[in-house]
Image (cartoon, helix red, strand yellow):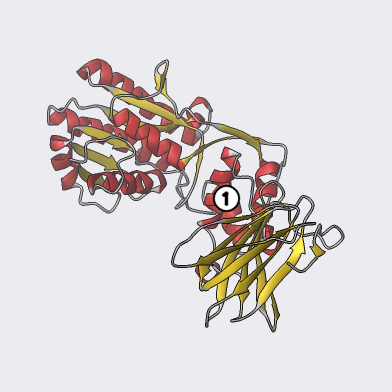
């Protein structure tokens, strides 16, 4: 299948091309699309003569080309309406009646220069469908957010993510303003569905089925919480779809020299203990390093429970039920990764039996609170 993508270097185009290239190369089989794809990428810097060649060969056209913020408002009509006209004329000249998709905007329903240009483009496509019988798919996208979107241009989410990640100021005129947003991966998934003939059509238009509605203030608060999560060693609520998508977007705007961040290592002569993540609903994740011959623990819990996983070195985890004398031993090493549950009511310890540091990944159902540790010393 030959696929023509105009505006291939833009935000949506870049994401769509990346996914289709992965499908073509056999790296992404999740869409069930035949990998026999030939992708024609056309953008503002592409040789114009190639448009005729691509339109002659295309089996499907994604028209994602357009401008959002030209220096002159007349460019709205020239770029959005004008190029759409050129594209459709080129298809007609080649006798190509393949399906054509148009990236429009919810702004097409508004009386402004950008909206008028989008509305005019839609009219062209409807006329083209009537004249040629070709299948047209017109998407009125709301605000699209995700990786690779240009900040300080026409996306509030991209601007907020970029500026907050880079310690720059943001301006919020109305925190209560409601935004309707679609995530770039959901957009790409819908476009591939359209390529398969399974577009989500609602009346004469097509829509991305997953739309998020949220206020501007809530978006800003979430992004600031993402920034603070490093110091708090917390993780956003990934069970919320919008939060998960916004957090992924935020991370894509981190400065390249700030992908890493330090953790507080609690170090003594036995080794170290370092918290990695604290969550209110999924407990605490930590890494424990024990020096050779060192035993740690010798305590028990009423309700707190843990999981230990030795990922480097070898050792033994010992248990004794409170009130009993029998000791149970579990020998552990990085040669055979296995999780050991630490049940309540058993005093326990972990000893490094090797000649090198032993590294143990630990999870506890509760985050440690000094005023309520639920941890009581008792030799195994």
How far across and how far down the image is residue 280, in percent?
72, 49
Query: What residue occupies the far right of the structure in this picture?
Result: 371
Tell me the residue that label 1 is attached to.
Answer: 247
How far across and how far down the image is residue 79, in percent?
36, 41
Q: Residue at x 46, y 50 (%)?
A: 71
| Residue 305 shown left or right of residue 17 in the figure | right
Query: What residue occupies the far front of the structure in this picture?
Result: 325
Mark 1 nearby-residue class (10 Å; few <14, some 14–19, many ≥20): many
Q: Residue at x 21, y 41 (%)?
A: 35
Of residues 256 and 368, the one drawn nearer to the viewer in this rendering: 368
Q: Is residue 346 visible?
A: yes
Task: Name the image quarter holding the N terminus.
Answer: top left
Please tell me in which quadrant of the rendered image residue 273 appears. bottom right
Say what secondary structure mark 1 lies in.
helix
How far across and how far down the image is residue 290, in percent?
62, 76
| Residue 300 shown left or right of residue 29 in the figure | right
Of residues 9 and 234, the one drawn nearer to the viewer in this rendering: 234
Q: Is residue 227 above or below residue 117?
A: below
Task: Name the image quarter holding the C terminus.
Answer: bottom right
Q: Is residue 88 above or below residue 268?
A: above
Please tell me in which quadrant of the rendered image residue 300 appears. bottom right
How far across and how far down the image is residue 129, in percent?
27, 19
């Amino acid at each position: 299948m030959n696929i023509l993508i105009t505006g291939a270097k833009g935000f949506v185009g870049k994401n769509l091309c990346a996914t289709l290239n992965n499908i073509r190369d056999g790296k992404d089989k999740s869409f069930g699309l035949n990998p026999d794809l030939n992708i024609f990428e056309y953008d503002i810097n592409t040789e114009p003569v190639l448009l005729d060649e691509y339109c002659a060969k295309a089996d499907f056209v994604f028209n994602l080309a357009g401008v959002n913020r030209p220096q002159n408002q007349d460019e709205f009509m020239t770029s959005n309406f004008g190029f759409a006209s050129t594209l459709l004329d080129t298809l007609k000249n080649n006798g190509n009646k393949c399906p054509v998709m148009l990236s429009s905007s919810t702004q097409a329903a508004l009386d402004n220069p950008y909206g008028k240009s989008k509305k005019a483009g839609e009219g062209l496509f409807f006329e083209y469908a009537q004249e040629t019988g070709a299948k047209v798919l017109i998407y009125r996208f709301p605000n699209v957010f995700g990786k690779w979107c240009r900040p300080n241009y026409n996306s509030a989410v991209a601007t907020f993510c970029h500026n907050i990640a880079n310690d720059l100021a943001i301006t919020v005129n109305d925190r209560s303003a409601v935004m309707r947003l679609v995530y770039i991966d959901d957009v790409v998934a819908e476009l591939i569905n359209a390529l398969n003939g399974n577009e989500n059509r609602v009346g004469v238009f097509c829509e991305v089925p997953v739309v998020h509605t949220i206020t501007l203030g809530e978006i800003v608060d979430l992004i600031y919480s993402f920034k603070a999560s490093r110091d708090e060693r917390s993780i956003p609520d990934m069970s919320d779809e919008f939060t998960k998508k916004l957090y992924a977007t935020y991370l894509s705007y981190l400065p390249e020299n700030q992908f890493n961040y330090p953790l507080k290592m609690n170090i003594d002569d036995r080794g170290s203990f370092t918290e990695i993540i604290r969550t209110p609903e999924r407990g605490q994740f930590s890494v424990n390093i024990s020096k050779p011959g060192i035993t740690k623990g010798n305590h028990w819990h009423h309700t707190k429970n843990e999981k230990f996983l030795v990922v480097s070195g070898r050792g033994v985890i010992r248990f004794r039920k409170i009130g009993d004398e029998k000791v149970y031993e579990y020998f552990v090493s990085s040669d055979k990764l296995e999780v050991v549950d630490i049940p309540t009511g058993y005093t326990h310890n972990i000893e490094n039996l090797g000649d090198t540091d032993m590294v143990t990944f630990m999870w506890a159902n509760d985050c440690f609170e000094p005023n309520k540790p639920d941890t009581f010393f008792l030799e195994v």
